[in-house]
Image (cartoon, rainbow, N blue to C red):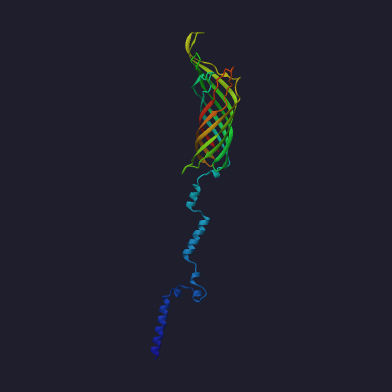
């Protein structure tokens, strides 16, 4: 009887022990869980803790991708400032328009050539919004050209030169930078108000026969003659520009473009007793400069 009871108790105890050994709650749970004071859900997950540490690390130290994106952030008009100072020089080609006619409506002269000059300019542009600018400045501009009198008995032409200190006023619209580049296109229009400082001309005669002091035939060029009487002291011209803006720094840009000027005011006074012919100034130039 005692042996049978001992065998039964041993089998019951072994069965309970085997049952509990396959229960993860019994094997892995701490005592406070077994006592009913908490749940396994309250334990921190190793994977979740590791993810929290990574998130915390991201907040303190920026990743390489974020650093690269911040360094490669495209430059826009928003971080370029309000005032922009530009220094330009424009090699120009100048000619005179044919508007002079006699009483019968016939032209009295024809264009025979152009003059070359260089126009230095300083401009101050103000960015009103986005890529829209308004600017003004100062320039020294030389107009002119070559003409010949159709009814002149000599084969000759006269070269005119008109120099002005000008005050340019512009409005400018600039596009966004082209994709993956620092270049943009700009369009500009406005007017120049000029104040005359030097008017002159010189004549050139071709194949003219000279008898004194030595007889001969050849070309003859007169000295430059100042124009003191019959000149108009002011000039107003319309200006149009198109070009490329290349940004090499936050506040440093290279400018390449072309421009056209048309003078509305004729530089010389004409009339019944005037010796001067009637014409307008025109000009085309190549714009080269830097803008800060």
Residue at 54% from the left image edge and 26% from the top image edge: 281
Eyeballing the image, is 108 above or below 172?
Answer: above
Q: Nearer the viewer, residue 239 or 10?
A: 239
Left or right of residue 103: residue 1: left
Q: Position of residue 131 (x, y in %)?
A: 54, 41
Q: Position of residue 202 (x, y in %)?
A: 54, 18
User: Outermost residue, front direction?
Assistant: 104
Q: Position of residue 107 (x, y in %)?
A: 51, 20
Eyeballing the image, is 114 above or below 52?
Answer: above
Q: Position of residue 241 (x, y in %)?
A: 52, 34
Left or right of residue 44: residue 10: left
Residue at 42% from the left image edge and 80% from the top image edge: 16
Residue at 50% from the left image edge and 72% from the top image edge: 39
Query: Which of the image's four quarters has the C terminus?
Result: top right
Tell me how many marks there are.
Answer: 0
Query: Which of the image's four quarters has the N terminus?
Result: bottom left
Q: Nearer the viewer, residue 236 or 39?
A: 236
Q: Nearer the viewer, residue 145 or 138?
A: 145
Residue at 55% from the left image edge and 26% from the top image edge: 142
């Amino acid at each position: 009887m005692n042996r049978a009871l001992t065998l039964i108790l041993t089998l019951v105890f072994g069965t309970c022990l085997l049952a509990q050994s396959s229960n993860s709650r019994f094997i892995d749970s701490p005592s406070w869980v077994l006592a009913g004071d908490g749940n396994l859900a309250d334990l921190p997950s190793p994977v979740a803790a590791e993810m929290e540490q990574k998130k915390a690390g991201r907040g303190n130290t920026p990743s390489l991708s974020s650093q690269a994106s911040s360094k490669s952030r495209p430059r826009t008009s928003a971080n370029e400032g309000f005032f922009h100072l530009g220094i330009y020089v424009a090699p120009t080609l100048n000619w005179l328009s044919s508007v002079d006619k006699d009483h019968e409506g016939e032209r009295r002269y024809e264009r025979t050539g152009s003059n070359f000059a260089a126009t230095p300019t300083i401009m101050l542009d103000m960015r009103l919004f986005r890529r829209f600018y308004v600017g003004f400045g100062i320039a020294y501009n030389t107009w002119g050209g070559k003409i010949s009198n159709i009814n002149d008995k000599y084969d000759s032409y006269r070269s005119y030169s008109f120099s002005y200190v000008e005050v340019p006023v512009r409005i400018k619209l600039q596009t966004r930078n082209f994709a993956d580049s620092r270049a943009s296109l700009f369009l500009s229009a406005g007017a120049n108000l000029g104040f005359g400082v030097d008017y002159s001309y010189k004549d050139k005669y071709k194949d003219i026969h000279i008898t004194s002091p030595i007889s001969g035939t050849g070309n003859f060029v007169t000295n430059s003659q100042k124009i003191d009487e019959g000149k108009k002291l002011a000039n107003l011209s319309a200006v149009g520009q198109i070009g490329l803006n290349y940004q090499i720094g936050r506040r440093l840009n290279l400018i390449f473009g072309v421009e056209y000027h048309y003078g509305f005011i004729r530089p010389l006074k004409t009339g019944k007793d005037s010796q001067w012919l009637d014409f307008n100034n025109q000009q085309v130039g190549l714009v080269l400069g830097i803008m800060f």
